[in-house]
Image (tube, rainbow, N blue to C red):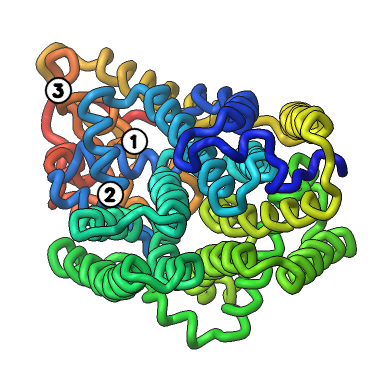
Amino acid sequence: MTLLHDPTSDPMRDRAPTAVHPLIVVPLLAAAAVYYPIVHNYFREDDFVNLYFIENYSPARFLITVWAEHSLVTRNAIWWVLHAFVGTHPQPYFVLTFLTHLAAVGMLFEALRRLTGSATTACLAASLWGTAAVHEEAIGWFSVYGQLVGTVIVTWMLLRLADIRDGDGFGGRAMFGWSLLVLMVVTSFGVGLGIVFALPAIAFVLLPRSAPWIRLVMMFAVMAVVSFLLYSNLIALNWKLYGPFPHLPITAALSVPRALFKLLGLLAGNGIVALHAGPFAKRVPELGWTWRVLVGAWVFLVLVTFVRAPGSHRRVMLAGLALAFACYAALAGGRAPYFANGIQFQHEARYQYAATIGLATMTCVVLARVGARLRPSSARSMVGLVALVAAMVLGERFFAPPINHHVSERLETESVIGAIRAEVAKAPAGADVYIENKRFGGVGPLLSTVGMPWFPGWAAVFAIFFPDDTVDGRRVHFVTDPAIVKAGEQGRRSAHLLVPRDSRGAGATPLAH
């Protein structure tokens, strides 16, 4: 326990508060050591759908696509630009997610250091969050990249709020820029809606009563309303322009209040366990005695710390609570109707990325207050800090489940591409090639079956990885059900690739089996 540090005796406390602290290197190296292998990941599930949409539809349609209740304009814009430069090579995508995660870790460290006054405990909390195994899914699945973007923005906002609390100004130009950032957050991922509703409360509790406090709270409150209207109208616009799609409004959760509150509690409890049990979190049975002890102990420590902490630290804890609660509430609100029907969304690790920033903030204050009581020497603090962070890294590397690089999806993709090329090679030069369309398991069990109208199997894989419909002088078609052909009429590739089973012309090759 000697590593817990009293902020008043921090060896670098006299540094300029806005200067980057040297200890930022520790959580960055820790997170990099754990998550660097993720740059070798491959695409999975919704990744293929998004790549298909980029190839098959206009940029405007792709930008405003609302998928699974997520508003994704910001994420889609980043994806479209990246695809224009690197195409379907997976490594640049996951190098970007890796670097974005490191940016979030660095921002979190600086925000917590400035909010609590302790570089040591900020280093511990940022390392704990940055190395947590629960983040593998969010970092290693590019479809979730918008949540990383939103998290980087909110950690930067926490950092800047600390500076404003300590005397920095906040004028009209800053207000305009922050308003744009709020719109980026709400259009990055579903949890962004929760984040923007938390921001007024965060500014309200963190800042002293002053002109910047009034401007920020009012701006965040107005932008929360604007964000909800934008979210709702994007759904309506998408529906109007491109037809109906499976969607449940977030207000549908109010019809299943028991499921809503149960899912909210399970998401929060699982987040507490995932963050603090580290590599052993998956070995803790949900709602088992170990799970209950961990959650109960954390809640107890937070409550005791809140009661005994000075006002400045209480405000930081309230800000963390507001962020975590809003994220979990948004997720529970969007998934409660499905949860009520037996879908276990509380186990989805990707839902923990942004929310656990709030939990880590509260944990940081607990550590800072323990350090204030113990008052260890600076030398012992540094030795203990390095030892603990090293233990975190080693634990995640040797005891956490290995990173899933989605090799099966890579192999299936290569197999489908090879099978298509083989069918094309069988046909005479200049002939039309008709290939029986098949399901593609890489998009997951739901989209590969009932989702065929949105991702038409092999035809979609062909559209993603082949630049046009002609291969080696032979025009390729995919023979499929009329309903799937009808659904593909709006696509610039699918309108020509997909043909019904009764329309094969003369000279067509035999169907691939």
Residue 237 visible in the shown view? yes
* Label 1 – label 2 distance at C-alpha: 29 Å
Q: Whole-percent x and y of residue 269?
A: 71, 64
Q: Nearer the viewer, residue 338 or 272?
A: 272
Residue under pointer 3 = 470
Residue type of the residue flagged with mark 3: Thr
Residue under pointer 2 = 74
Question: What residue is shown at x 71% (from left), y 69% (from top)?
Answer: 306
Q: Residue furthest front?
A: 14
Residue 65 visible in the shown view? no
Q: Nearer the viewer, residue 47 or 503?
A: 47
Q: Whole-percent x and y of residue 77?
A: 23, 43
Q: Nearer the viewer, mark 1 or mark 2?
A: 2
Q: Earlier in the sequence, mark 1 or mark 3?
A: 1
* Label 3 – label 2 distance at C-alpha: 33 Å
Mark 1 neighbour class, 10 Å CA radius: few under 14, some 14 to 19, many 20 or more: many
Residue under pointer 1 = 458
Q: Is residue 360 left or right of residue 208?
A: right
Mark 3 neighbour class, 10 Å CA radius: few under 14, some 14 to 19, many 20 or more: some
Q: Are marks 1 and 3 in contact (CB under 8 Å)?
A: no
